[in-house]
Amino acid sequence: MLTTIYANGERVEIAGLDAPGIGDAKCDREHDRGVEAASELAELLNSGPVTIGKPFRDQNGRRVSKVEVKGRDVALKMIGDDVAHETNSGLAWCH
């Protein structure tokens, strides 16, 4: 699932990651992981200056943007912290 943030009133889909769902979770584990991911994302975005790159189309044709905090890629940070998966990884949250 794409991860969406809002910046300056604009909807921004974060490039490179799929996060577990909350409202549309397929199992309790996905829901719980989704809450964890949302909390970590909020903490990360509030930890320093946020830079949003120019929108582009990802391999699925979705309009996304690279998002960085203090020069660090948000997608890579969240994937590294195991609260999100890389786009098209094929990994499931329910198992």
Image: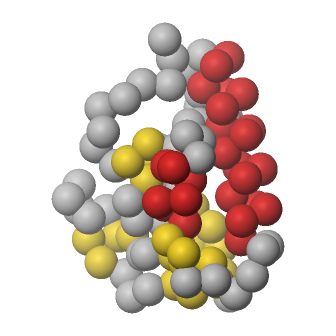
Q: Residue at x 56, y 53 (%)?
A: 78
Measured as percent of width and height from the top left, residue 14 is found at 48, 65
Percent position (x, y) of residue 29?
Answer: 64, 19
Q: Give x and y (percent) for residue 61.
A: 23, 62
Front residue of this view, candidates 42 and 71: 71
Q: Residue at x 42, y 25 (%)?
A: 92
Indicate the quadrant where residue 10 lies: bottom right
Q: Is residue 94 left or right of residue 36?
A: left
Color scheme of the displayed model: secondary structure
As drawn, 92 above or below 3: above
Q: Please identify the quarter of the rendering in which residue 48 is found.
A: bottom right
Total residue callouts? 0
Q: Quick one: which residue is furthest to the top in this view? A: 95
Above or below: residue 56 compared with residue 1: below
Q: Residue at x 43, y 53 (%)?
A: 17
Visible residue check, residue 76:
yes
The reply, left or right, for residue 10 in relation to residue 35 is: left
Residue in the image at 40% along x and 65% along y: 15
